[in-house]
Amino acid sequence: MGRIGVFVERYTISSSDEMEALMRFSQVARRMGHTVDYLFRPDMHKIPQYDAIFIRALTDPLNTSYVAARTAQLHGKRVLDDPDSIYICCDKINMYGHLKAASVPLPETIWLDEAEVTHKRAQELLDTMGPTVVLKAPNSSFSMYVDKVDTPEEFLKVGKRFLRRSDRIVVQRFVKSEFDWRVGVLDGKPLYVCQYVIPKKRWKILTYTAEGKAIYGPVIPVEIEKADPRLLATARAAAAAVGSGLYGIDLKQVGDDYLVIEVNDNPTINAGDEDTKAPHIYEDVIHYLMAGQG
């Protein structure tokens, strides 16, 4: 029997789908003979008392969750997400660098520093990568600070706005689709497969109204056994380029090929979505966390 600490923030448990998933995780862990406790910021000093830590809060090297991950790592505890994965995935330039080095298939992707964000360079990129390109701030998440542009003027306006957050921006060829594939990968093995449907009259899976309301489409779970082996192979290659932890790989399908859009650490696991066609998901995470214990 082992002790698992689940590090959460208040906003984590305010989501009914996330909370239900955590309850399912806890029930499965206890059925397997383990104990589970929820840890908040004031509880971080307790991390060394646990055998493994499962982080279910927004990750970023500047967030408390990274401190929790580093604390667990320094005390020799198995942790999801591990600090190295957080460090890589929370910086898109770092992440794309790892994917390129591993020859993972991507839409054409480059990054520019501030001096390169000019009208002339914007026109060149729209001519060669366009007619539409996507700009991303390196430290963005949940589709925020990700915009598509069609003209040099839009390129400069969005690019300069993103440069307030970073000294570089990512430029990526726009790939139109009705949905994104999401493949969860744990320790190099597919954990779940879903389609994240793009809402009508939108171009990405999550957008926001002027009032800040989130707009997103339905999630369509797919059995791993019925997924295209090429989809799974591409997702595994992308995960391996980052590490051996838990990742959500976003991919676009172009004909019979798959292009990796991003690798996400701390991927979403909501009750009724990612776990619908993957009832083993919680057991697999627990087995990984408790590997080598007892």
Image (spheres, rainbow, N blue to C red):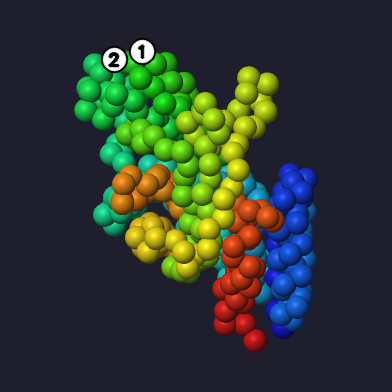
Q: Is residue 65 visible?
A: no
**Label 1 belongs to which residue?**
153
Query: Spatial distance from mark 2 to mark 1, Cα to Cα?
Result: 7 Å
Q: Circles 2 and 1: CB distance less than 8 Å? A: yes
Task: Classify 10 Å Cα crowding around label 2: few (below 14), some (14-19), many (20 and above).
Answer: some
The residue wearing badge 2 is: 119
From the viewer's side, name the closer residue of 130 and 223: 223
Label located before the other in sequence (2 or 1)? 2
Give the residue drawn at x 34%, y 28%. Answer: 133
Disc number lying in front (2 or 1): 1
- Looking at the rendered structure, the number of numbered marks drawn on it comes to 2
* Residue 162 drawn at (x, y percent): 46, 26
In the image, residue 257 lies at what x, y percent? 31, 51
What amino acid is found at the position of numbered circle 1 in the picture?
A: Glu
Type of amino acid at the residue the image marks with label 2: His
Q: Residue furthest top?
A: 153
Q: Is residue 5 above or below residue 92?
A: below
